[in-house]
Amino acid sequence: MLKNLLCRRAAAGDGGSSNVFSMFEQSQIQEYKEAFTIIDQNRDGIISKDDLRDVLASMGQLNVKNEELEAMVKEASGPINFTVFLTMFGEKLKGADPEDVILAAFKVLDPEGTGTIKKEFIIYSNFTGFLFTTRLISLQVKNMWAAFPPDVAGNVDYKNICYVITHGEEKEE
């Protein structure tokens, strides 16, 4: 009953509870669910130290220290189920670097200062975020091109990308 009341209050905008699922579009939630499923190696619905060790080993990182794994798990306030996992990403997104910091990272790939970079630089760099599998990489790039299509020469307007990351909406030209 309390759960229903909180859900109704959140839906009504009472501020009684915040619903982490409202922070993301349905397609984003599905992508996070796929990532969660990949990481939850033993399929118990909780990401544990062992799950992290196994998924990192599957990506070739075989010598991860116990302390590092414990620190990752301790970033959550309790067991990491899907809702906690999603909340952690929501908090990380809210705490995105300032626009000038993100721009400076992109400018490294733009020595002429044109405001654009070749799409290949994005594909082969770490700018695409947390990359768990080839499938997720292609999904992220596909979504990026849908939101920020390269021009006919294959250039991407990174200033617009930075604006959207920090302000949440596309610039009006």
Image (cartoon, rainbow, N blue to C red):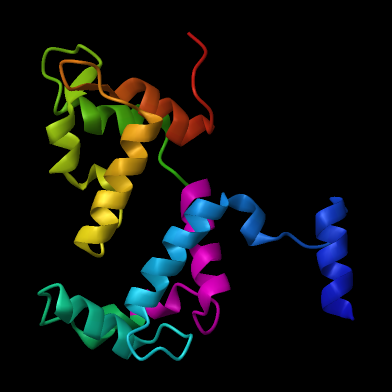
Left/right of residue 97 with respect to residue 52 in the rendered view:
right
Q: In the rendered view of the protein, which quadrant contains the N terminus?
A: bottom right
Which residue occupies the foreground of this view, 59 or 76? 59
The residue depicted at 52 percent of the width and 74 percent of the height is: 82
| x then y, percent, for residue 10 | 81, 58
Q: Is residue 15 visible?
A: no
Asked whether residue 91 is drawn in magenta, I would say: yes
| x then y, percent, for residue 35 | 37, 67
Residue range highlighted in magenta: 71-94
Q: Is residue 15 above or below residue 56?
A: above
| x then y, percent, for residue 54 | 23, 85
Q: Is residue 141 visible?
A: yes
Which residue occupies the foreground of this view, 33 or 95? 33
The residue depicted at 52 percent of the width and 64 percent of the height is: 86
Q: Is residue 112 above or below residue 27?
A: above
| x then y, percent, for residue 30 | 48, 61
The residue depicted at 23 percent of the width and 30 percent of the height is: 106
**Residue 84, quarter of the rendered image:** bottom right
Which residue occupies the foreground of this view, 121 or 151? 151
| Residue extending farthest top | 173
The residue depicted at 32 percent of the width and 48 percent of the height is: 140
Asked whether residue 52 is drawn in magenta, I would say: no
